Image (tube, rainbow, N blue to C red):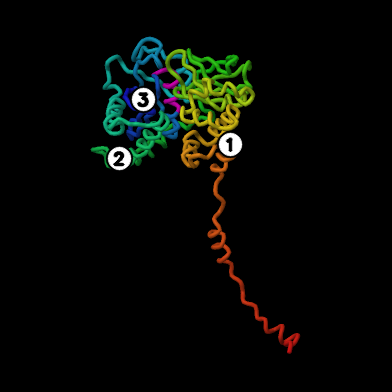
Amino acid sequence: MGRKTVYLDNKKVTINLFCMRLCYSCDIFVMAFYRQNEESFLEGNVKAFEHFGGVPHKLIFDNARVAVKEGFGAHAKPQARYQALSAHYAFKMEFCNPSKGNEKGLVENLVGWIRRNILVPVPKVKDIDELNQILMTNCLKYRSHQIRGHEQTVGQMYEIDKSLLYSLPKYVFDSSKSISVNVDEYSTVRFDRNNYSVPVKYAGKNVSIKAYGNILIIFYRGQEIAKHNRSYGSNKTTYKLEHYIDILEQKPRAVFNAKPVKDHVKQELLEWGQTLPGGARDMVKILRLCVDYGSDKLLEIKKQIPAGVTPTIDLIRSYLIEQSTPVKSAQKIIDTVNVEEVDLSIYDRQYGVAQ
């Protein structure tokens, strides 16, 4: 893995790059993670196999603790989870000796290539998912590249590589760290020193958590009920506004002081909500619209309402209703219908013309 500084949502963050490369074709796979932990390492392997469309017969890796429990090189003892991954995908594990980067030179060179060619200038993206989309686009683009000294492109040689890979198994290896916990009275669950919200109706229920490198998914009786970006740090609480709308509708007076509201709703929107005729109850309705349409859309509507006009929920909703099909378009459709001309003289001949 390599490291690089990027901007996620205008915040300077150091991310970790999981890199894998096929030896013959030099085809590449790169994925960004928040941390160099076991979940990220295992997930990176799984995603790489899916990208290559198969599994190499042998994987050469360094001696990082995410893969090696003790020892090094030929004497290395793999971590239990990495050994399980190897058994699931049927590849042979091989580890480098200490300070022997030349034993995996293709990957060492790849880390430098990614830094120079994709991550310069420093990317400014919304989140790590957007960054990974950029990385994946460049991985696919690399298949059109022709390495000096080779007669074929990376993509052409990759097709030969792919024909020799083991087939992917029917079931994907679960790379997550999984636990079961009870939802507390604040409708949150705790995992790895941080808290995450779930819909309030699950308070007191026992749920399952699956934590991957970048995301955390919560299930109740096999059904996904919440999904969050994973937090790394200590004692942070990640709320989702939609998880608390139902309880706010029952207790609207708490709307302006509720932590999930303060964390997700812009101050301008809160101040606007205080001017609504229905007060706190109308503010809760605004939050429901905010979940459906986004706060930026509502703030755009705020600017469109003429000065001096008292905003109401019905007025705001009227701005959200999409305009119906213009009459001109409907007329155009009618004009395309061919109507045959009728010969009315036949009636004159049959019934006679009135004198």
Marks 1 and 2 in Cβ contact (< 8 Å): no
Residue type pointed to by label 3:
Lys
Marks 1 and 3 in Cβ contact (< 8 Å): no
In the image, farthest residue toward the bottom: 355
Please tell me the numbered disc located at residue 313: 1
Residue type pointed to by label 1:
Ile
User: Which of the marked residues, 1 or 2, is nearer the chain's N terminus?
Assistant: 2
Per the image, the residue denoted by label 3 is: 11
Please tell me the numbered disc located at residue 145: 2
Residue at (51% x, 28% y) in the render: 172
Question: Disc 1 and disc 2: Cα gap in Å?
Answer: 56 Å
Residue type pointed to by label 2:
His
Residue at (55% x, 19% y) in the render: 209
Q: Position of residue 309 (x, y in %)?
A: 53, 40
The residue nearer to you, when weighing 134 against 193, is 193
Vertical relation: 137 (above or below) 253? below
